[in-house]
Amino acid sequence: MRTVTHWIDGAAYDGRSTRAAPIWNPATGAQQAEVRLATVEDVDVAVRAAESAYASWSQTSLSARSKVLFAFREIMNRRAGELAEMITDEHGKVLSDAAGEVQRGLEVVEFACGIPTLLKGGFSDQVSGGVDAYSYRESLGVCAGITPFNFPAMVPMWMFPVAIACGNTFILKPSERDPSVAVLMAEMWAEAGLPAGVFNVVHGDKEAVDALLDHPGVAAVSFVGSTPIARYVHERGIGAGKRVQALGGAKNHAIVLPDADMEFASHHLASAAFGSAGERCMAISAAIAVGSAGDELLPHVQEQATAVKVGPGRDPASEMGPIVTAEARDRIVGFIERGSAQGADLVVDGRDLVVPGHADGFFVGPTLIDRVTTEMDVYTNEIFGPVLSVLRADTVDDAIDLINANPYGNGTAVFTNSGGAARRFVRGVKVGMIGINVPVPVPMAYYSFGGWKDSLFGEHHIHGPEGVAFYTRGKAVTVRWPEAGTPSGASMDMPTAT
Ligand code: NAD
């Protein structure tokens, strides 16, 4: 059985314990490998390597740093297919979707290649007589990233290209469910010429996460995962004096107005709800049909849900793959059962789906549940599976109120042909990322990604300009070079400009 090990100080590292977790092949249901789980001592080895590398990496010139990023970009571009196959084999998503994930991650690398421009400071000449002022930003030190299973390449790439470009060193603690991609990316960094210890990978579970949060050598933590763990990571990390950004879970609503093109809306709703088997933090899991839209929309969505081709991710004919683990599949099935028991209308039921030749794979088919109300378990929980709930609202304002009453605020979308209604929606919702006739509005790399309310703890969104701000801190410098013989002008009063 293949064993996935840590990567510390530029080389594979076995760790001091043989504690391990299984890595499944979700399409077959068989275990394909195991991953080592780090101890507190293993994390300490990684932090020391990253601290030692920081001394020189933080002093490396901007152009030398950006050259390494350009080289990494070229290598990753060349080996993108390898990464995508690895994602499909451990996560389960279809190959074309995995390739899309790699591409969106690469765009953050491309953003970070421009780090010399992004780190340009400000200068003011002659702020007072013979005095100039300037400000710039410096790196923080050792930064850690703790990431979820659903985007094993893209979510880490929301973090480390920017952190490393800014002059920090980095320790990635990827999900233990699909950890191999992290090690392949570490090998690519080494090939790109990144000095040993600047990028490290520590595999593990709560023990490794707690060790990173408590370690005095870690300056900042970026987390992406479920809301309860995001809240916990934020509180514990802040308590230990670190800078923390913790992105949590989601319940993303799309509202459909009666004036929308129902054919267009149903295609996009189905792809947003069932793409990647609904295991996306920006998946649409609740559609709110406003006024008369519901009765017109539903048959279209039903048709789309029934037409999705579900199968192993490696099969080019598959549009949707399996769920990541049997446990996650059983949890999703449980929610569908409860939705039906609590009185919702099960229009398309994915529970009984059997994929020929893959009877033991962790599959659930696309599921469409109508007449869902806000007290039902299918609505109050993030299901994180291919389940679309349909709710009804009388007006746009009722739909906005419904969205705002939900504790999450990650993404949302409106389908309409009315600019006025769309503007009212954008201004009214308490949500961080909004799409107008775009159901998965993931911001481009040069904007920042982040939700509101229980979808993000901390002040900074991730990547883009806010990522640069998160991984740096400011210095403001006031300078005087007095010429010989200039009277000092010093006084005991608060200095003011002259
Ligand atoms: P998760 O919260 O179970 O795990 C995320 C990370 O936390 C993993 O590295 C895991 O090892 C670690 N972890 C798990 N339990 C822990 C504990 N008790 N203490 C400390 N660390 C722990 O999330 P997941 O199931 O891997 O991913 C799915 C979740 O991530 C969904 O809720 C999804 O919405 C969310 N997500 C959010 C975003 C976003 O941008 N907001 C993006 C992707 C995924």
Image (cartoon, helix red, strand yellow):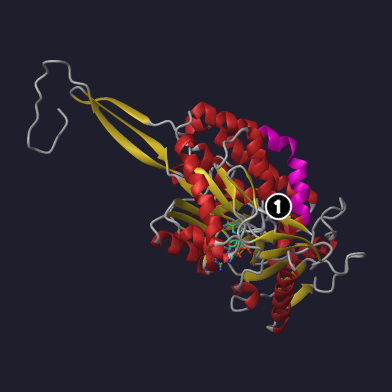
Which quadrant of the view contains residue 295?
bottom right
Query: Which of the image's four quarters has the C terminus?
Result: top left
Q: Is residue 291 visible?
A: yes
Q: Is residue 369 above or below residue 110?
A: below
- Between 321 and 173, which is closer to the camera in this rendering? 173
Residue 93: image location, x then y, percent = 76, 56
Q: Which residues are magenta?
A: 74-89
Q: Is residue 103 left or right of residue 67?
A: right
Q: Which residue appears at 59% of the width and 74% of the height?
A: 380
> Which residue matches tag 1?
180
Which quadrant of the view contains residue 364?
bottom right
80 in magenta? yes
Residue extending furthest right? 357
Q: Which residue type carries mark 1?
A: Ser
Q: Which residue appears at 53% of the width and 40% of the height?
A: 164
Q: Which residue appears at 57% of the width and 33% of the height?
A: 113
